[in-house]
Amino acid sequence: MTAYEIIAKKRDGIELKKREIRFFIEEFLKGKIKDYQLSALLMAIYCRGMSDDEIFALTESYIQSGARIDLSGIPGIKVDKHSTGGVGDKVSIILAPLAASLGVPVPMISGRGLGHTGGTLDKLESIPGFRVFGSADSFKKQLAEIGVAMLGQTDSIVPADRKIYALRDVTATVESIPLITASIMSKKIAEGIDALVLDVKYGNGAFMKEIDQARLLAQYLIKVGAAFGKKVVAYLTSMEQPLGKNVGNWLEVAECIDCFHGNGPADLMEVTLTLTAEMLVLAGKAGDHEEALRKCRDALVNGTAFDKFLEMVRYQGGDTGVIESPQTYPLATYRQVVPSPAAGFVQSFDTQAVGLAAVQLGSGRLRAEDAVDPRAGIVVHKKIGDFVEKGEPLFVMHTNNEKVLEPVAGKLLSVIKIGEKKSRVPKLIAERMNRQ
Ligand code: URA
């Protein structure tokens, strides 16, 4: 078996055998297969696709490249949630403590923001002192003691994905459904879950611009989960506009605190409650979706969900003072309104551009090594279907970099369409999918 033969087979559309896929990944990690050869294979996969068996084999090889966390000693059905990424998507920060407060063990390994999408780790790190890294043992200990842990991926979990993702990023091979499936599911399986709720985003602020692509990705994620004995339920949710009001790390944590206190925006609450309720049902903590929704609402109203959030913040070294009194958190030095140039209805957003505008204000990174400003971001004052008067705020920019205020204000005016007609608000939760 040689790398050359395997690349040529895939190039010619011939199905690869499990042992060929395993050989390629193992030899690449040992340095015996070079970056340029793996890049060629990735492009062949991108162009030719993969059969179900090939995707299972690739996922398995990814998992075998590192350690697998064993959570079997922790009682209960361990359920995680994964979102394919969006703008203003802070659901995890509410959902994980909420589900845990109702008895669902939530082992959540999250990522950083890259490109226009935000990352849960960056958001949590905006809480002073909050630690997002720890060993597999400390992850397990925390899960056993308080029922929820939100950490970053350690070096030992699926090292193949980290290396291969970096190559995909520079070879235009990220947007491949087989490669995305293996990348996501290998990490979820290696973290030791029993079940998974997926939020597969579609629309102009998502990876998958079209719902058909999102559905196909969800089908593969569900299939691979089932092949590894995991129950997976997927929701297709819209990213045609930012979720909730705030985009940017601390701004999003502050919005989550509002949600715990019953003051969350309707769209953010709808996605959060739907996904958390699904976790409760998967974990056997509610008989059906309606009962689960009731339990979730009660846990928010009676404060047990917020208490669990505080407990997690404290456990991970974070300052609970700012969580209890968010008004004490220092805001960015520059805060500037972007007023509406005309009266009318908000008809659409270029959501990806909103995410990129927040990055330019300092909230995200365009390269993995960039630092983020926890206080930077955008507050979105009007959403699709809202009426706005001329001069009324559309956005408020938050930044510590005065130089970017003017260019970003100009960009923000071009990312929102205002017209005379009230357009239809895109359906937020389009579909629920599970194994047929
Ligand atoms: N998220 C991942 O973890 N992997 C991908 O390939 C795409 C999104």
Image (spheres, grey):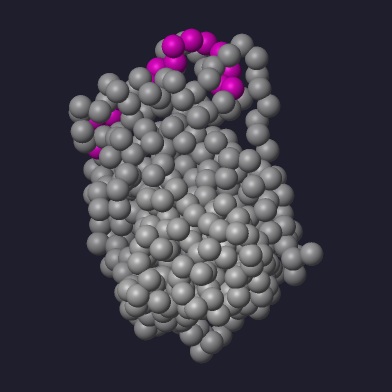
Numbered label tally: 0
Up/down of 72 relative to 290, above or below: below
Image quadrant where residue 401 sits: top left
- Please report the residue visible at 52 percent of the width from the left and 28 percent of the height from the top: 349
Q: Which residue is pictured at 34% across the width and 22% down the height?
A: 409
Looking at the rendering, the stretch of residues picked out in magenta corresponds to 332-347
Residue 424: percent from left, percent from top: 68, 27
* Side of 217 relative to 41 (left or right): right
User: Which residue is found at the position 72% from the left and 49% from the top?
Assistant: 431
> Between 417 and 377, which is closer to the camera in this rendering?
417
- Figure quadrant of residue 413: top left
Inspect this view and state whether residue 61 appears.
yes
Q: With 236 as the anchor, is 251 left or right in this view?
A: left
Q: Is residue 337 left or right of residue 212?
A: left
Residue 343 lies within the magenta run:
yes
Rendered location of residue 375, percent (x, y):
28, 43
Question: Which quarter of the picture shows residue 358?
Answer: top left
Residue at the farthest bottom position: 73
Return the residue nearer the eye: 206 or 71.
206
Can the viewer see residue 260?
A: no
Residue 180: give x, y in percent of width and height.
53, 58
Q: Main secondary structure of the magenta part?
A: strand
Q: Is residue 78 above or below residue 293?
A: below
Tell me: residue 77, above or below residue 233. below
State the residue at coordinates (29%, 62%). Answer: 130
Answer whether residue 18 is magenta in the image.
no
In the rendered image, residue 107, in percent from the top left (x then y), is placed at 48, 72
- The correct choice, above or below, for 273 with respect to 365 in the image is below
Quadrant (top left, top right, bottom left, bottom right) of the C terminus: bottom right
